[in-house]
Image: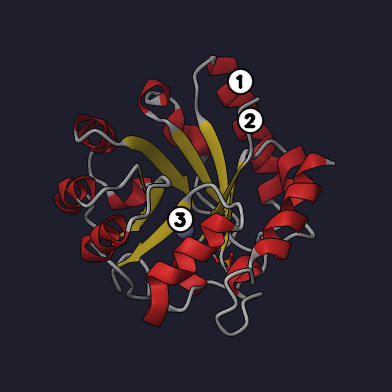
Amino acid sequence: MAPDLIAPSILSADFARLGEEVDHVLAAGADIVHFDVMDNHYVPNLTIGPLVCEALRKHGVTAPIDVHLMVKPVDRIIPDFAAAGATYITFHPEASEHIDRTLQLIRNEGCKAGLVFNPATSLSYLDYVMDKVDMVLLMSVNPGFGGQSFIPETMEKLRQARKLIDASGLEIRLEVDGGVKADNIGAIKAAGADTFVSGSGIFGKGRDSDPHRYDSIIQEMRQELAR
Ligand code: DX5
Ligand code: ZN
């Protein structure tokens, strides 16, 4: 199985000093930066766009940036995120009129492509596009806000997604997003996930500006993953 990746969601970071927050969480051992893009249309919240992604690159962030698009429509903004330095771009199938085309667009722009499944969205969207995805992202909360509780039905869905990915023989990451904390990350891994988004579970542990404030939480998550 692919190595586990811890992906802090900067949605819960201190935006007034975002570059420093990202530096510190990566120095603590996080692997990739999860970047939540919300448009107050597809989801009832408004966050950040390509400018902020580009600013993180200019600041010196070299880790992969995992752009989770919660916007509708999606195609118009994809080239902008590719130019801004996105590594992964994932989107919700309900937000695209032509899912196959959007997946191809992301890869043509030089990024890795992924589909995101809301708690009530069927995995059948994968049926005819498995060869065009690099990431399957299962939402374990309804998208729009950090700090919600993990929906337990996600566990069974993770097992189903893991089977589909293994049967495909393709190199596809299985990511989970929402309510992931040190106390459930081990069980989530056992259900098949290999990429773990955590917002409030990591940034909620921060106090003042101690550069090592995230060391212990990332370490604790690693220990739970290694069990
Ligand atoms: C929710 C976002 C998540 C969010 C997760 O729509 O996609 O990435 O930041 O936050 P926590 O880990 O606090 O549930
Ligand atoms: Zn997200």
- Tell me which numbered mark, 3 or 1, is placed earlier along the sequence: 3
Amino acid type of disc 1?
A: Asp
Q: Are marks 2 and 1 in contact (CB under 8 Å)?
A: yes
- Tell me which numbered mark, 3 or 2, is placed earlier along the sequence: 3
Relative to 109, 206 lies left or right:
right
Q: Whole-percent x and y of residue 172?
A: 50, 28
Q: Whole-percent x and y of residue 98?
A: 23, 38
Q: Which mark is residue 34?
A: 3
Amino acid type of disc 2?
A: Arg
Q: Specify the quadrant of the image occupied by residue 60.
A: bottom left
On the question of residue 206 being in view, the answer is yes
Residue bearing the label numbered 2: 162
- Pick out the residue farthest to the front: 211
Secondary structure under the numbered disc 3 in the rendered image: strand
Graded by Cα atoms within 10 Å as few (under 14), some (14 to 19) or many (20 or more), the crowding at tag 1 reads few
- Pick out the residue farthest to the right: 227
Q: Residue at x 76, y 44 (%)?
A: 225
